[in-house]
Image (spheres, rainbow, N blue to C red):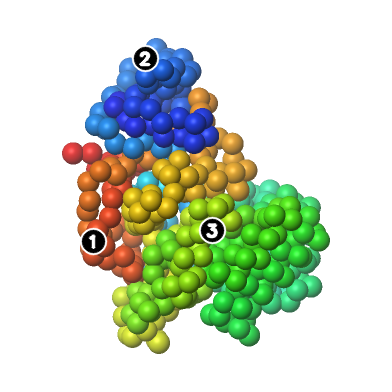
Amino acid sequence: MNLCIVNGRIVDPTQNLDAVGELYLAEGRVAAIRAENVSLGEIPAGEWERIDVKGALVMPGLIDLHVHFRDPGFTYKEDMKTGSAAAAAGGFTTVCMMPNLKPVTDTPAAVKDLHSRQEGINALAVGAITMGQKGTELADIKGMKEAGACAISEDGRSVADAGMMLKAFRAAAEADIPVFDHTEDDALLGTEAGEACLAARDLILARDAGAKLHLCHISAKLSLDFIRAAKAAGYDVTAETAPHYFVFDKSRATHGHFKMNPPLRTADDVKAVIEAVKDGTIDAIATDHAPHSREEKEQGYEKAMNGVIGLETSFPVSYTALVKAGHISLFRLVELMSSNGAKILRDENRGTLKVGAAADVAVLDVETPFTVDPAAFRSKGRNTPFAGMEVYGKTLLTVCGGNIVFNDMQ
Ligand code: DOR
Ligand code: ZN
Ligand code: ZN
């Protein structure tokens, strides 16, 4: 059945559109938009299911460049079904799944296996850079790209050997696939310098190889200074941060739910991350959704494993801490959480509500405050630092490829 979302505040920076009206979705695509002074596309004949969203925000489906779904290998933490359900509940229609699984996603067959098990949303495989993420033998990067991998990454760790990383950048350039780069020097683990050193190294190496570099979960002012300078010098680089890095400083790092890698930084770093989100040094907000079991997270800060979940809090936390707080516009947030992700993935059919684009849509209530309650999460993970926070931006409806994948309309 075709779907018509009625009475939505349709916001799409790719068309400079912010108007209350109707969004028509047919055959998995955006068919038409009708609003005051706006008439885009043709409304096809046929039956329409009409959903009145009563003024809620209607935007392109959210895109998360960085999640851990733990499947295969660690399905007690999360699996394809619960991860995808958590994504849909957060308004996400596309996510990129990091390869630190068991087995590691390091072959074309592993990429295909993940894609054959998708559950409602576009869960895209990121291939490993080296076999088994061991850092010694390059994976079949071209083969994984041909199998449908959206990027390559060694996430969870870095490629320590600069020579190996240069080879990887060359292979990625050749295969025309972006590199999602976890930058941390093993010898300087957890420090600002460790993050910035490898960010600087890889800016240089990727430039040398002509590769497309995307820097993951940037948390430190020092790294941002280098990224800003590189962008000004014309380097082909993009960068993401995660909500916990612009909300919390390291004074909160006393409970396992505030432990992740890279770790929370100083109040100055938090300010620098917000500044970078504002001035375009940061291109995307990703979650680094990293579910762990209760036992793995609740035995004190020192023993806790690294990682926090984020899919079901990312939009409301970002909306509240960035838009409501007056740092950025709603347009800019939609870019950071959807349109720019599509650009980084080089997918012209997503991150936009242009006629003909994929019918991937998020409908969110940004007027009514609510309290983050981990007990209500679809994720198996409960390891969130945002529990109890009052936020705006509850998901009401998520549509992926024209199908309703989450519906909390009253
Ligand atoms: O905190 C983290 N958790 N950082 C990583 O790099 C890996 C991730 C995980 O897989 O749990
Ligand atoms: Zn990482
Ligand atoms: Zn990660």
The residue at the point 30 percent across, 26 percent down is 6
User: Residue 42 location, x and y as percent?
Assistant: 46, 15
Of residues 257 and 282, the one nearer the viewer is: 282
Q: Secondary structure at mark 3?
A: helix
Name the spot of residue 296 as percent of width and height, x first: 37, 79
Say if mark 3 contacts mark 2, CB within 8 Å: no
Dot 2 surroundings within 10 Å: few (below 14), some, or many (20 or more)? few
Distance in Å between CA atoms under marks 1 and 2: 41 Å
Extreme residue toward the right, this view: 208
Residue at x 37%, y 74% (from the top left corner): 258
Could you tell me which residue is drawn at 61 percent across and 68 percent down? 223
Kindly tell me whether mark 1's CB lies below 8 Å from ligand 1.
no
Q: Amino acid at mark 3?
A: Ala
- Residue 273 appears at what percent x and percent y? 50, 63
Task: Look at the picture and state if 399 lies above or below 184.
Answer: above
Task: Choose the circle earlier in sequence order: 1 or 3.
Answer: 3
Q: Are marks 1 and 2 in contact (CB under 8 Å)?
A: no
Q: Name the residue beneath numbered marker 1.
A: 373
Quadrant of the drawing holding the N terminus: top left
The numbered mark, 3 or 2, whose residue comes first in the sequence reads 2
Label 3 environment density (alpha carbons within 10 Å; few <14, some 14–19, many ≥20): many
Under mark 2, the amino acid is Gly
Number of numbered discs visible in the structure rendering: 3
Q: Which tag is nearer the camera, tag 1 or tag 3?
A: 3
Residue at (63% x, 72% y) in the render: 196
Give the residue at mark 3.
276
- Residue type for callout 1: Asp
- Element assignment for label 2: loop
User: Seen in the image, is 49 located left or right of residue 74?
Assistant: left
> Mark 2 sits on what residue?
46
